[in-house]
Amino acid sequence: MREPRRRVPAVGVLALGVLMAACGFFDRGASPADTPDWAALRERMVRTQIEARGVHDPLVLEAMRKVPRHEFVPEGVRNQAYADSPLPIGESQTISQPYIVALMTELLEVGPGKRVLEIGTGSGYQSAVLAAMGVEVFTIEIRSRLCQEAARRLDSLGYHTVHVRCGDGYAGWPEEAPFDGIIVTAAPERIPEPLLDQLAVGGHMVIPVGAFYQELKVITRTPEGFSERSVIPVRFVPMTGEVERRD
Ligand code: SAH
């Protein structure tokens, strides 16, 4: 007599599938083998994009090696976080190319214990790089959604020496002035007067200036006034708000 063929009940197959899914069997994207080696990507970024182009300040290089840039960009572009380019961060704004972040940070000539004002928090990445160098950062962002996200992100990543304010950075942060350095990461056509007033003697302001064609400038406050030099042509998003209403 022939045994009737045993059949695995359909419900059993379903249960097995659910169990496998629950254990992450199908979720290959999350397995450690597929997670990019962020530290290795960062190391390569520093060597090939930053050191190779002449940024040598050890404090800056160390900070660029440490700060997890991939945590500051949207999920959809995370795999390009260490590429040699700016990336979109939402609301038509961008996080600067890693080399530009490193160069601007070096030009500030600041270190542990110094205080820096940043206009244009964006993702918070530039602030985090400065904080990783032991700098206390006061940063202002005009777009409230970006501002709130950056504040939350910086806090959750442990950058507690960054103070984030939401609003127009045109008038700076007079209560905390003077600053040892000022970095502006959106381009005005002309440098806002109140920011110059808030720079300490001996301090540098690093700022892209211009409309379509912009120059990265370093303004230094001397005991007699200000000196200015142009570094390289750059392309930043425009500074908006009050500065657009002035001529
Ligand atoms: N430093 C940022 C990138 C900045 S992009 C980072 O590391 O991600 C420039 C930012 O400047 C944008 O988020 C833009 O909203 C902001 N911005 C433009 N005009 C501003 C103003 N008047 N005050 C403050 N932020 C401003």
Image (spheres, rainbow, N blue to C red):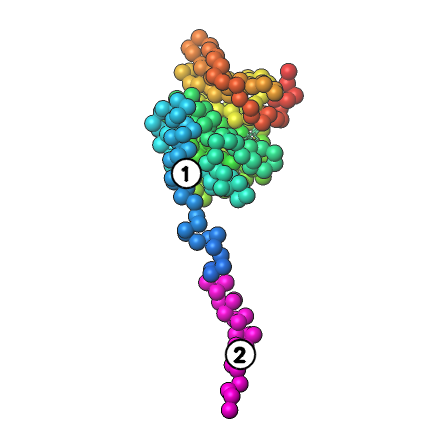
Q: Position of residue 148 (x, y in %)?
A: 54, 40
Q: Position of residue 113 (x, y in %)?
A: 36, 28
As drawn, the residue found furthest toward the left would be: 58
Q: Nearer the viewer, residue 158 or 18?
A: 18
Q: Nearer the viewer, residue 81 or 138?
A: 81
Q: Is residue 143 magenta?
A: no
Q: Residues within 10 Å of mark 2 (few under 14, many from 20)?
A: few
Indicate the secondary structure of the residue bearing disc 1: helix
Q: Tell me if residue 242 can be seen.
A: yes
Q: Residues within 10 Å of mark 1 (few under 14, many from 20)?
A: some
Residue at 51 percent of width and 88 percent of height: 2
Q: Which mark is residue 238?
A: none
As drawn, the residue found furthest toward the right would be: 245
> What residue is shown with label 1?
41
Q: Is residue 11 magenta?
A: yes
Residue 76 in which image quadrant = top right
Could you tell me the amino acid type at mark 1?
Answer: Leu
State the extent of the magenta-drawn residues as a range. Answer: 1-23
Residue at 54 percent of width and 77 percent of height: 9
Residue at 61 percent of width and 36 percent of height: 91
162 to the left or right of 210: left
Q: Position of residue 203 (x, y in %)?
A: 42, 18
Indicate the secondary structure of the residue bearing disc 2: loop
> What residue is shown with label 2?
7
The mark that comes first in sequence, 2 or 1, is 2
Could you tell me the amino acid type at mark 2?
Answer: Arg
Residue 13 lies, with reference to residue 171, above or below; the image says: below
Residue 141 lies, with reference to residue 34, above or below; the image says: above
Residue 103 in which image quadrant = top left
What is the C-alpha distance between the residues marked 2 and 1?
Answer: 51 Å
Q: Position of residue 16 (x, y in %)?
A: 50, 69
